[in-house]
Amino acid sequence: MQRQTNIHTSINIRMYAPGAVLALCLPCFLSGNVFGYDYGEEYSDSYYNEISNGDRLQTGPTQIPCPPQDLSRWDKLFIMLEDSQMKQDMLMQQTEDMVKAEMDTIWKELHKLNNNKACVQASENTCKCISEQMNRNLNQAIKQLREVADMYQAQNNETLQQLIQFSRNQASRLTKLESNSGLGQVAMKSFSAYPKEQEASNGDSGKLERALMATAVDLQRVHAQLALFQRATAHRYLPSGCEMALLFPMRSKHIFAEVTPSMSMSLQSFTICLWAKVTQSLNKTVLFSYGTKKKPHELQLLMARRSVLLTVGGETHLVEAHGAVTDGQWGHFCAAWSSEQGLATLWVNGENVAREPGVAEGNVLSGDGFFLLGQERSRSGIYRDLDSSVAFTGKMTGVNMWDHVLEAERIKEYANHDGSCDGRGNVIGWGVSEIIPHGGAQYIN
């Protein structure tokens, strides 16, 4: 409270001090006696050049019209404030002069360094050494990260093997307990004539049932943990044997990949296989497409929500499989077609999910078109006219194409996670054929 009162007093002094000073000096100015002189115009007094006889002039102190007043504490305070302001201005001026002098010195030193070529060369050499050292440190850090990733993968594999072995042990224990339970029931039926032995058999049967229930609960818990681990592993890593994948980070008409086939083609049959993990499947999401100037949508393997479709010779000739797509999970998709009977088949994760005869029967795929991944060819043939609504977003790997229909056993073999990218198509081979990413598409490990 005392502090607030002092603050208000200081503010009032600053507000009313000029008015107080003006009030003190204004009467002196108005009367014209500010300097102690009388400028009045009355001359009524008579002055004679006579000296009185024996009368002495009475002398006394001279009175000043506006006598100077003693300085009050407010006047002293204002004087102190003015002195403080002057000192502050002097210090600021001195500081500015010092800063200007230091800046001039620095500019002179920099000018000398620029003129000295030896210093410049030494600086460049130092920067090069620092850059090389940083590169070495970065490479070492990357190597350590890879080692940690390999160790983590080995630990995950070991844990998975332990879980599998534990599941097998639990299954064998379950089988033994079931067989023992059956023997107990037979014994109860055989000795039903003896009450005491029957009660003992009932007790043993209850123990077996409780043990059986506990084992079943443990087995269910192990199965749940194993499924959770498998889902986490499938979400994090690429299919086994695939060292790299194409990443399509967002849905854009500028993001796709162009494929150059390994051989000139004029196909009457084919098989396409690839691994894909779609972020979100819309009404039409293109995985693989081939188009020419006359037929921009000659061949397409695409998704539609939870369905997968194959079109040959235009969108009117198609085969479709429902409920075959799951967003955010890796899936193996294969499509085969033969011109002889127009037989088209679709395979998802090694299973034949659709089969349709009479699809573009007698059609031939000419060799003057373009293969695209994650996008379809525009009717104008210009990349800037592509449609972003059909673009693929997610990851893709193991893209292969053959000029014939593969056997069912080979398709099932390629759908296995182990060694899934070991096979190579003779028209398009993953890791062999030239696949050029465009826009934001890129290769990842």
Image: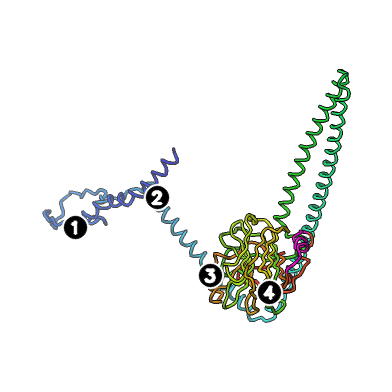
| Element marked by disc 2 | helix
The residue under the point 73% across, 44% down is: 224
Q: Reading the chain from its start, which is encountered first: label 4 or label 2?
A: 2
| Number of numbered callouts drawn | 4
Find out whether the residues at labels 3 and 4 contact each other: C-beta distance under 8 Å: no
Would you name the residue on which mark 2 appears? 76
Select label 4 or label 2 by which is in front.
4
Judged left or right of residue 114, residue 379 is: left
The magenta-colored residue range is 405-417
Q: Nearer the viewer, residue 266 or 240?
A: 266
Would you name the residue on which mark 4 appears? 268
Which quarter of the picture shows residue 262?
Answer: bottom right
The residue under the point 57% across, 62% down is: 284
Select label 2 or label 1 by which is in front.
2
Find out whether the residues at labels 2 and 3 contact each other: C-beta distance under 8 Å: no
Would you name the residue on which mark 1 appears? 39
The residues tagged by marks 1 and 3 sit, at their Cα atoms, a distance apart of 56 Å
Select label 3 or label 4 by which is in front.
4
Q: Position of residue 310 (x, y in %)?
A: 63, 65
Would you name the residue on which mark 3 appears? 100
Amino acid type of the residue tagged 3 in the rendering: Lys
Q: Is residue 149 above or below residue 98?
A: above
Q: Reading the chain from its start, which is encountered first: label 1 or label 3?
A: 1
The residues tagged by marks 3 and 4 sit, at their Cα atoms, a distance apart of 84 Å
The residue under the point 63% across, 76% down is: 370
